[in-house]
Image: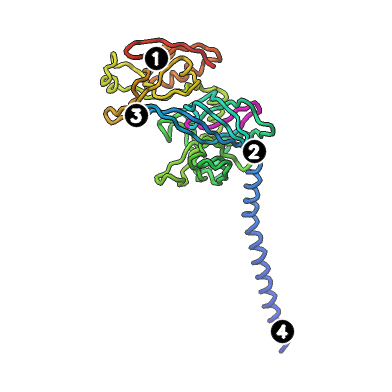
Amino acid sequence: MGTYEMVTRWRHRGFAALVLIAAVVGTMLAGRPEQADAQTVREVFQKVEPSVVVIRGRGRDVTASGQTRYTETGSGVLISTDGQVMTASHVVHLLDEISVEFLGGETVTAQVVASEPAADLSLLKLDRVPPGSRVAAMADSSTVQIGDQVLVVGAPYGLSHSLSVGYISARWAPNTVYRTMPLAEFFQTDAVINTGNSGGPMFSMKGEVIGIVSHNISKSGGSEGLGFVVTLNTARQLLLEKRSFWSGLEGLTLTDELADLLNLPDRAAGFMVKTIAKGSPADQIGLRPATQLATISGQEVPLGGDIVLAVQGIPASAANMAGIRDALNQLGPGGPFTVRILRAGEVLELTGRMQ
C-alpha cells in the first residue's frame, strides 16, 4: 500500500471520527435544555408548593323539589402572613362552611371577606395560619407575555397539589370573553385545568403568582387546552385595593316579562333571591332565600324568597347592578347600607353595616 493510499484512508477515518464526535456532542447539547427545563420546573414547583391550599366547603342550593346541600372543592393561594387566601368566587361565594388544607395536611377554617363574581375572584381570611406556612410571591402580571411558560398548581378532582405545565396562549381584555364576568382580564393557557383547579394559582417560571385559575372551556368535559386564568393585577385591584363587597347572595334579575307573570307592581325592578350563604351580609340583615325553583317561559325562576327592589336607594335593575356594586364598595367597615325588599306582597326595608 502506497503512502498516498495510507494518507487518504487516515483522512477518511479522521473525518468519520470527527463526524461521530460532533454527533455525540450535538446530542448531549440538544438534551441539555430539555433537562434544564425539567429541572427548573421541578425547582419552581418545590418552591411554590407550600403556598398552595385546597379549599373544601358545604353550601345550600334550591331545586324544583326544595332546598338541598352540596359540597365544593377548589384551590387557593396564601398571599399574606396574616392569613389572606386568594381563590375563585364560584368556589366559595355561597358556602356556609369553608375549610382550608395546607400541604402538610393541617386544616383551618376560613371566611370570605371580599368577593367579585363579575371577575370570579374571592378573598378568604384564615382563622389562623399554620406554623411554617409559606406566603406566595406576587408578580406584576402586566409583564407576562404570550409564549411564556407557566405552572398551574391545584387540586384537580380533589387530588391536592397537582402540577400542570403550559404556556400563555392569549391575553383577553375585560368584557371581551364572558358577559357574566365583565371585570376580568384573562390569560388563556394550554396548561391542564380540571374541576378542582379553580381558584388555584398560576405561577411564572420565577415562582411568582401571575393569575388565579377560573375555568376551562370543554366539549368533552375534560381539559382541551382552553383554560382561563384571571390576571393577578385584576385580583390585586378588586380584592386588595377596592376590597369588593361580599354579599353572599345569588339570584335572578327580574325582566319585564317576569314581573308581569308574577303580577309585581309597576313592572318593578328587582332581584329575586335564590340562595344565601350562612353568616354573609345578606344573611345577617335577614334576607330570605327561595324555597323552590319553577320553570317559567323556559327559564328557571327562584320562588318563595325575597325580591330585592333597591339597594342604597338604587333600583335593583340589570342596568344598575354595576352602580350598586360601586356604591357598596365605597363603604368602609361599619358603613351603613339599606335594602328595600318585597316579601309576601309587603314592601320592607332592611338595614345593615359593612363588616
Image-based side of 307 in relation to 76, left or right: left
Instruction: Give the image location of residue 148, x and y in percent.
Output: 56, 44
Task: Give the residue at x 26% y 21%.
Answer: 261
Task: Quote the CA–CA distance across marks 4 and 3.
Answer: 96 Å
Residue 77 lies in quadrant:
top right
Disc 2 residue crowd, few under 14, some 14–19, many 20+, Cα 10 Å: few
Amino acid carrying label 1: it is Ala
Disc 3 residue crowd, few under 14, some 14–19, many 20+, Cα 10 Å: few
Amino acid carrying label 3: it is Ser
Nearest the viewer among 224 and 168 is: 224
| Residue bearing the label numbered 4 | 6
Instruction: Give the image location of residue 237, x and y in percent.
Output: 55, 26
> Does residue 119 sit above or below 5 in this rendering?
above
| Residue bearing the label numbered 1 | 310
| Residue bearing the label numbered 3 | 65
Q: Which mark is residue 104?
A: 2
Instruction: Give the image location of residue 355, x and y in percent.
Output: 54, 17
Secondary structure under the numbered disc 4 in the rendered image: helix
Instruction: Give the mark, 2 or 4, whose residue is nearer the N terminus.
Output: 4
Q: Which residues fall within the magenta stretch?
A: 78-90
Secondary structure under the numbered disc 1 in the rendered image: strand
